[in-house]
Amino acid sequence: PNPAVNNEINIYSETNLEEIQLINLNGQLIQQIQKPKAVNNTYQLQNLPDGFYILKMTSGGQSAAKKIIVN
């Protein structure tokens, strides 16, 4: 799992993401961002509550999920 620093996550992507979802281990959607804005191919999520999450990113009909820890 990737640890978050200062309750922030930086996501580097060479393609434009259509959606970012932060999901807790109970399957509850904590944060959802439609058409997020990138700065230098990096997306930033802030003010995240501490915990273990699944980060789901969607682009072009395809999705990827990563495990993250916010502490």
Image (cartoon, rainbow, N blue to C red):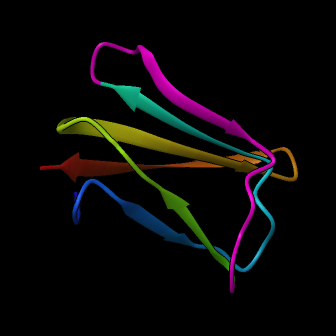
Q: Residue furthest bottom?
A: 40
**Quarter of the image containing the N terminus?**
bottom left
Residue in view at x 81 percent, y 48 percent: 35
Residue in view at x 32 percent, y 48 percent: 67
Q: Is residue 43 left or right of residue 18?
A: left
* Above/below status of 19 relative to 5: above
Q: Is residue 61 left or right of residue 50?
A: right
Q: How many marks?
A: 0
Residue 3 drawn at (x, y percent):
20, 61
Read off the magenta span: 25-40
Q: Nearer the viewer, residue 45 or 63?
A: 45
Residue 29 drawn at (x, y percent):
48, 19
Residue 5 drawn at (x, y percent):
22, 66
Considering the whole magenta stretch, tell me its main secondary structure.
loop
Residue in view at x 39 percent, y 15 percent: 27
Residue 17 drawn at (x, y percent):
75, 57
Q: Residue furthest right?
A: 60
Q: Is residue 45 left or right of residue 57?
A: left
In the picture, residue 30 is in which quadrant?
top left
In the picture, residue 12 is in which quadrant?
bottom right
Q: Is residue 2 left or right of residue 27?
A: left
Give yes or no for residue 26 being in the magenta stretch. Answer: yes
Q: Residue furthest left?
A: 71
Give yes or no for residue 71 being in the magenta stretch. Answer: no
Residue in view at x 27 percent, y 23 percent: 25
